[in-house]
Image: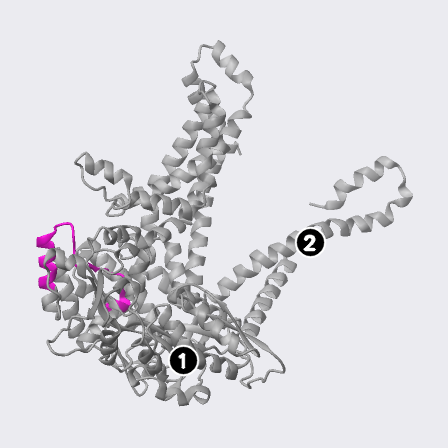
Amino acid sequence: MDPTTTDAAPSVQTGVPRRVTKPRRQRRIAPYAFVTPGVLLYVAFLLIPIVYAIYLSFRGLRVAGGAALGRREEVFVGFDNYAKALTDGDFLAGFLRLAVYGLIAVPITLGLALTFALLLDSGVARLARFSRTAIFIPYAVPGVIATLLWGFLYLPATSPISDVSEALGFGVIPFLNGSTLFVSVANIAIWSGVGFNMIIIYTSLRSIPKELYESARIDGANELQIALRIKVPLVVPALVLTGLFALIGTLQLYGEPTTLRPMTSEITHTWVPLMAIYRDAFLRDDLSLAAAASVVLAVGTLLVSIVLLRFTQKRAFGE
Amino acid sequence: MRTRITTVVGLAALAATMVACASEDDSDEAAQPDGPITLDYWAWGTSQDGLVEAWNSAHPDVQVRRTDAGGPSDSSAKLVTSSRADEAPDVALVEYQSLPAMIVADVAMDITDHVGDLSDSFNEGVWSQVTFNDQVYGVPQDVGPMALIYNAARFDELGVDLPTTWEEYAQAAADVRAADPDAYISTFAPDQFGWFAGLARQAGSVWWEVDGETWTVNIDDATSREVAEYWQNLADEDLVDTGPILTPEWNAELNDGNVLAWPAALWAPGVIHGVAPDQAGDWRLAPLPQWEDGNPNVAFQGGSAVVVTTSAEYPEQAAEFAAWINSSQEGAEVQIETGQYPASLLGQEATLQSDPPELMQGQDEYWEIAAEIASSTVDEISWGPNVNVADSAFQDAFNSAVTDGTPLVDALAETQQVVVDDMRETGFSLSNE
């Protein structure tokens, strides 16, 4: 991309060739001047931290000298941290938990979001504007607040749900124990996430030309057929986008389990990868191992995103 | 393409320079202030505002600004990070168990020259918690000799006798269950590392030992395994509740009178009063049950000291502050008023003239019992340089053991392994295999 080619057009229109030489040099500088703030911010807040994290991941704190309370100093340790992260059973088990969580949370979030969006768009729903806001509001509740709120609903002694189930003779529901825990954690994410995803899909639905529905109706299609055969295929790009967000959101799961941790013995310090990274960095004071694990997680996220986009690109964007 | 490579290389060099700058040490020369100075002090807890206020009004030239940087473990974690950036506060409160880690991370400064003569103000066991190789790294503020607090009203109601040994405690636990199936004598909280360490210490185990330059880790020794087996039995027979404590769930049970006792330390009354204010006057203090009849020894759980950090610009003034708030009459008064058990001998004597904490209203001999407990503490340091690692490993291992129903002794072995591996990797000399 040569910035001068497109910029040259107006000067031709003015028809004043004499002024071309000087502004041309200015124009050569101008685009760079415009992108400089962006580039500087990008370098300062993205590139340097990434490079620094990669640098840190090859370092480690080791005791200098043999004293019983010798001071630890930062030294180069090669791939030690990567070897440790990739062979750490707790860290890897966190990815398995993420998979279970993701298999529950992602399809339900997207399924509900799509269903609500289609219902709101169909025009048959009453109180559409109110419903849209009502579904969206949980997204505006901060994650920690939402988790505390649900935590109180989960704990037997404070939960009205358990009061009801006990009164009916079913006993206490162990929301925060065993495999129910995954559903309970996923539920919080679904509750907060459906609204956001619904808005994206709904916006995409509104941009579909109404003529398509009209001709479908003339061809004898009912509302359900229109929804499944016309609307859904046309909002696939929005679905891919929300799917990608949901996937990345899954890999970044941290706030909910961390907030729930004091309430249950089931959630360890390493329940999900980001929690393990936090523990290494701040509870174990091993910033280098945390950096290596972060690089592993980031590369993993990148690979998963690329694979997802590869698989869906053709269908979604026709490229 | 070439420009891109040079940019990346340049950035890497820039990043490296930044690191080099950050890790560069300031000169050790202590500066002397020209005029009034301000010291930064990180500390948690209800006593701190009063302590700082008392100091500030008595010392106009050295003002102290306090920041609450979170509870013990959060505050320590931030201290290490900020110290590495040379941005740490001048003075900070640190739990005794984290002090070795603070020394190894080069956060706590050797202040022997400034406060070395304070040793007479504290009893030997307490002073040993801040002294390593004859060098003093902090001034003790409060101590937590372990004790039993119990809801005497509920004990009477259910006709349960106060246990004085752990054997009797198991019997009392069974009596409670028999008298009221909704109630438990107490909770075995699998995430309470300091609590379990204290019980193991009481039984005679020394988790970290140092001989010259060589460490020995004994978290998994026979004594600690016996302690684990004791609680395993109580948990298996459903005589104690298992699960985290001080959660909304636990607090609700406590308020319902379903938690009858809490073996903890002398700071416990304030905590229980905070979550169950309606039970004020129902609770009593008693010595912690013993492993052997007639041996009143107890260990410490919690308690903290004030350290001067290596980032401090005026170490002399900072040390003076640390010494004053923790060994003066004024400081002791603030601590007692706000429910801390002072570490200084002067402060501990002053408690005898005080009223019992609100939770123990009516127990006039409260402070005498407290003083007796405090005089039977086991001295000898038993904290190693990576207690933070042990703490998180312990919590995870014991939590998993309780949820999966696997033996607690296995969790103990797992914790030991993590601690040994970490020390070996860091480069400490170890006698463990």
Q: How crowded is mark 1: few (under 14 residues within 10 Å), some or many (20 or more)?
A: some
Q: Which chain carries label 2?
A: A
Does the rendering let one see residue A63?
no
Q: Which of the chains bears the disc numbered 1?
A: B
Residue A37, percent across and down?
67, 53
For the N terminus of chain A, which image quadrant? top right
Who is closer to the viewer here, A13 or A48? A48
Q: How dense is the environment of label 2, judged by Cα within 10 Å: few (below 14), some, or many (20 and up)?
A: few
Q: Which mark is residue A142?
A: none
Type of the residue with mark 2 = Thr
Report the side of B232 relative to B211 (left or right).
Answer: left
Alpha-carbon distance for marks 1 and 2?
61 Å
Q: Residue at x 84, y 39 (%)?
A: A11
Q: In this view, does A301 lie above or below A140?
A: below
Judge by depth and name the residue closer to the eye, B90 or B45: B45
> Judging from the image, what secondary structure is the residue with disc 1 in?
helix
Q: Circle 1 is placed at which residue position?
A: B329
Q: Is residue B311 left or right of residue B283?
A: right
Residues at discs 1 and 2 both on one chain: no
Q: Can you give x and y, in whole percent of width and height, for residue B203 in the image?
A: 17, 75
Task: Report whether B430 appears left or right of B135.
Answer: left
Q: Is residue B17 above or below residue B121?
A: above
Where in the figure is residue B18, as x and y percent of width and height? Answer: 57, 69
Residue occupying image coordinates x 42% and y 22%: A228
What is the number of the mark on residue A36?
2
Which segment is the magenta one? B170-196
Labels 1 & 2 near each other (Cβ < 8 A) = no
- Decide if residue A194 is in sight here: yes
